[in-house]
């Protein structure tokens, strides 16, 4: 299959990356087992450096600076004004001035190399995530990266092997795992109210046509990198928002594992029509070849015989949804909108009062203790703050992370694997076991708190 360099049109990325998704080996079968449940030494305070201060980074700086025992001590971005703006805000809030790194595509490396830093928090475009996380860990820092953490299976393996070799955490910042309804669903699953879990559904349905076509000068993505991905790739490039929570419900990597997937995509319609409407039918944007199908549907089967449906659509006029459905032998929870049906009345959804009572009785401890603060601080209704709060709590207490490097690698691997299946007309594709068998004895994620 012919591959072109994804960043051909983005000169600022230099030669750091090779192009997009390609068929790669899944790693030696006889490697030692993985290390789920890894604990790093506890940190009395967590000193954070943030890379990338465009769309996501500034909010991350704000959230992290509000967590007790956490200090934002370093900031990096290509653009000086972005760094200066966040540094000024921290100082105005009475916090020490952070070290700043800007002006070169390699300045982030200096941040990773700097002493006095515990965690590198990565908020850059997709193709930077894995290289930055790997470099941070090799510099002795824990790494946390926005989603997806990697875009090839090879990168996923590199994250796993680097985390194991350096004894550092690598967490994908999958904020949706900390949503109020997602943690409510996890609580119902862990308490057995849905019975034995059978099937989950997940999605990222988000109309991004305008955002993809908007130029950087208009506040769009830097170098229109997301639009460029749509030109170069098919499959599901952004699977983790819906997938992560469902994996936690099912205990994937902790008692079960993904075995194989099959994936199909529709043709591409939405971007071309949106480009024609905005720029004209004869414009270069309208005539461009976009490979990313409007709707991708991927179905995963697990070792224990459960299934997960994952969908991606960012070019159709539809309301936002992550689906977030989990079905068991005693009931079902489905979101957007939230509905629950339980035996012996599972033929009908609960009424509003009954559902409210159920949710009140089974509110997750994180939302019960910190939900109001989370809503005030913000970040997708508070789930971003709870994600950061829980991450820093685990680092401070020397606890295993809720989303470890094996989850990070597995959820991200669907980027390439779904594309492989689509290009092979839906042919099943094996999913690597990044734990190398350790999933069989790994402790399931509990109903965690602070």
Image (tube, grey):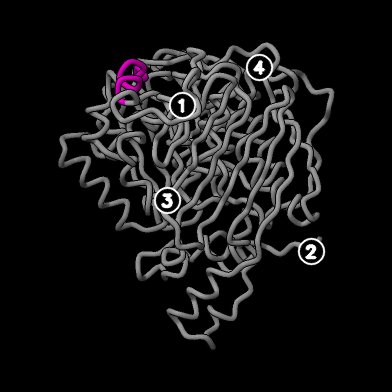
Secondary structure type for disc 2: loop
Magenta span dominant secondary structure: helix
128 vs 172: above or below: below
- Between marks 1 and 4, how big is the CA–CA gap? 26 Å
Residue occupied by mark 1:
341
What's the residue at 78%, 42% (across, down)?
A: 429
Q: Which mark is residue 2?
A: 2
What's the residue at 45%, 13% (across, down)?
A: 398
Q: Earlier in the sequence, mark 1 or mark 4?
A: 4
As drawn, is 116 to the left or to the right of 155? Answer: left
- Between marks 3 and 4, how big is the CA–CA gap? 32 Å
- Residue 353, horizontal then vertical, whole percent: 28, 26
Viewer-side label of 1, 2: 1
Q: Is residue 290 magenta?
A: no
Q: Which residues are magenta?
A: 356-365
Residue 110 or 280: which is nearer the viewer?
A: 280
Residue occupied by mark 3:
320
- Between marks 1 and 2, how big is the CA–CA gap? 48 Å
As drawn, is 61 to the left or to the right of 412? Answer: left
Residue occupied by mark 4:
255
64 vs 6: above or below: above
Q: Earlier in the sequence, mark 2 or mark 4?
A: 2
Mark 3 and mark 1 in contact? Answer it, CB < 8 Å: no
Q: Earlier in the sequence, mark 1 or mark 2?
A: 2
- Between marks 3 and 1, how big is the CA–CA gap? 23 Å
- Between marks 2 and 4, how big is the CA–CA gap? 38 Å
Mark 1 and mark 4 in contact? Answer it, CB < 8 Å: no
250 vs 270: above or below: above
């Amino acid at each position: 299959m012919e591959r072109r360099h994804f960043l051909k049109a983005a000169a600022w990325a230099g030669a750091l990356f090779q192009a997009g998704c390609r068929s790669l080996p899944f790693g030696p079968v006889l490697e030692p087992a993985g290390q789920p449940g890894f604990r790093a030494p506890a940190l009395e305070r967590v000193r954070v450096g943030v890379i990338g201060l465009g769309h996501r980074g500034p909010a991350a700086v704000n959230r992290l600076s509000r967590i007790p025992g956490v200090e934002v001590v370093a900031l990096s971005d290509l653009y000086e004004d972005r760094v200066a703006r966040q540094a000024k805000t921290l100082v105005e809030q009475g916090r020490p001035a952070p070290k700043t790194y800007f002006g070169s595509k390699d300045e982030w490396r200096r941040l990773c190399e700097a002493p006095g830093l515990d965690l590198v928090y990565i908020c850059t475009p997709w193709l930077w995530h894995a290289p930055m996380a790997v470099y941070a860990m090799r510099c002795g820092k824990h790494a946390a990266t926005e989603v997806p953490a990697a875009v090839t299976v090879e990168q996923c393996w590199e994250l796993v092997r680097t985390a194991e070799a350096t004894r550092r955490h690598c967490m994908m910042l999958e904020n949706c795992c900390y949503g109020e309804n997602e943690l409510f669903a996890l609580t119902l699953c862990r308490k057995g109210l849905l019975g034995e879990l059978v099937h989950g559904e997940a999605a990222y349905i988000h109309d991004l046509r305008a955002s993809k076509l908007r130029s950087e000068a208009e506040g769009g993505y830097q170098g229109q990198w997301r639009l460029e991905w749509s030109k170069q790739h098919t499959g599901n490039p952004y699977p983790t928002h819906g997938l992560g929570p469902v994996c936690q419900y099912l205990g994937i990597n902790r008692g079960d594992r993904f075995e194989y997937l099959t994936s199909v995509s529709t043709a591409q319609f939405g971007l071309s029509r949106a480009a024609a409407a905005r720029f004209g039918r004869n414009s270069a944007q309208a005539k461009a070849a976009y490979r990313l199908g409007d709707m991708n549907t991927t179905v995963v089967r697990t070792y224990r015989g459960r299934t997960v449906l994952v969908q991606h659509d960012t070019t159709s006029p539809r309301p936002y949804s992550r689906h977030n459905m989990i079905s068991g032998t005693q009931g079902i929870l489905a979101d957007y909108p939230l509905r629950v049906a339980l035996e012996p009345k599972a033929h009908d959804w609960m009424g509003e009062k009954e559902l409210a009572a159920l949710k009140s009785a089974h509110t997750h401890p994180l939302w019960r203790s910190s939900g109001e603060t989370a809503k005030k601080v913000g970040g997708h209704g508070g789930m971003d703050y709870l994600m950061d709060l829980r991450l820093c709590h685990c680092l401070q207490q020397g606890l295993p992370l809720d989303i470890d490097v094996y989850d990070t690698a597995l959820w991200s691997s669907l980027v390439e694997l779904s594309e492989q299946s689509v290009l092979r007309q839906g042919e099943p594709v094996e999913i690597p076991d990044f734990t190398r068998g350790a999933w069989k004895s790994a402790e399931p994620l509990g109903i965690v708190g602070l």
